[in-house]
Image: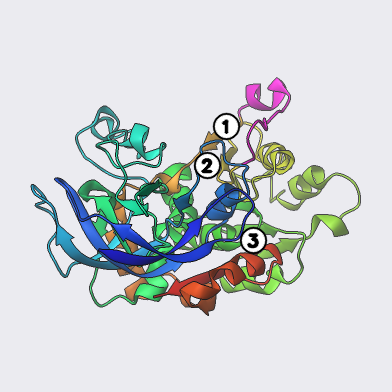
Amino acid sequence: MKTRAAVAVGAGKPLEIMEVDLEGPREGEVLVEIKATGICHTDEFTLSGADPEGIFPAILGHEGAGVVVDVGKGVTSLKKGDHVIPLYTPECRSCPSCLSRKTNLCTAIRSTQGQGLMPDGSSRFSIGGEKIFHYMGCSTFSNFTVLPEIALAKVNPDAPFDKICYIGCGVTTGIGAVINTAKVEIGSTAIVFGLGGIGLNVLQGLRLAGADMIIGVDINNDRKAWGEKFGMTHFVNPKEVEGDIVPYLVNMTKRGADQIGGADYTFDCTGNVKVMRQALEASHRGWGESIVIGVAGAGQEIATRPFQLVTGRTWKGTAFGGARGRTDVPKIVDWYMEGKILIDPMITHTLKLEDINKGFDLMHAGESIRSVVVY
């Protein structure tokens, strides 16, 4: 069949809208009509050439929602007409990682997924007989795409595609980092570095978890109002602080008899390795946890004095917010439908596929929280 797609033809080049060939689903695979897709910083990371796993030409996009059109042989958990969200972190429920219950990082198809291929080592996309690579196992910048059954979450059919597509990455990553990775307790203090799409979802995750003092840190003062909308109680712009931001934040978090200071939990949503260090060192001596969510460029490293860790701080990383996609994503969609979490305000721009490059421009200019392409 034919499908319209935004194709990444090379690093640093604008996406090109073209009609490509898409082969139907093979065994264990599902054909999905994508109804809406978000434009995420991870897509930009790959398109820029900074992603060491970036392969071209490819159809990017990993934050989508759509409808099952057809299923291949052996597919049992999905049928035509089901509403689904693609999962760049699948959940097979049978690999050693899934069975361990210690991680959400399913390894069933990781090797081929990183190569831009389906589990059998081939691609379903092509143009003029030439292969086009998949992206993160999803390729939601195509109106139709094929995914493994284990990489799709069946969700509430009443949920609007142009909103729940954001749950395919940003919402789940932010909220999940709080609930699944950090396991924040009621009354905790927390600091969130970077109030973009991920950071705002960390804020509302902290609100859900019952955190008390929630500090947002961002160099853009326009993000103060955004942060307050999603649960932030205090705002700090590092450019307006004299000297080192770390002691300033530590001092802010001194409460009552505790004169040591430092947050119970800190979250880096920037991808900046310097900020990652600041986040760790702004956490509380003895028990502070700092969660790394942002993705740094290839070859970059984080550093701190061993003393920071010896004295009880913990550095943690999280992918997809520690969520098990097929299990947890439908629950988060339900939370949205029940009004427990906000998504609508974060969808600041809605675009057509032919305008997808404008979405990246808005991201670069800091004018959008999330742009969504509706097919």
Query: Which residue does the numbered mark 3 point to in the structure image?
Result: 195
Give percent across and percent down for residue 99.
23, 32
Give the amino acid at mark 1: Thr
Residue at horizontal 23%, vertical 73%?
157
Q: Which residues are magenta?
A: 296-312
Specify which label sits upstream in the sequence, 3 or 2. 2
Q: Which mark is residue 118?
A: none
In the rendered view of the protein, which quadrant contains the C terminus? bottom left
Calculate the distance from the C-alpha at mark 2 to the C-alpha at mark 1: 31 Å
Specify which label sits upstream in the sequence, 1 or 3. 3
Give percent across and percent down for residue 39.
52, 63
Give the amino acid at mark 3: Leu
Query: Which residue does the numbered mark 2 point to in the structure image?
Result: 54
Residue at horizontal 67%, vertical 30%?
301
Mark closer to the observer (3, 2) = 2
Query: Which residue does the numbered mark 1 point to in the structure image?
Result: 314
Give percent across and percent down for residue 52.
56, 36
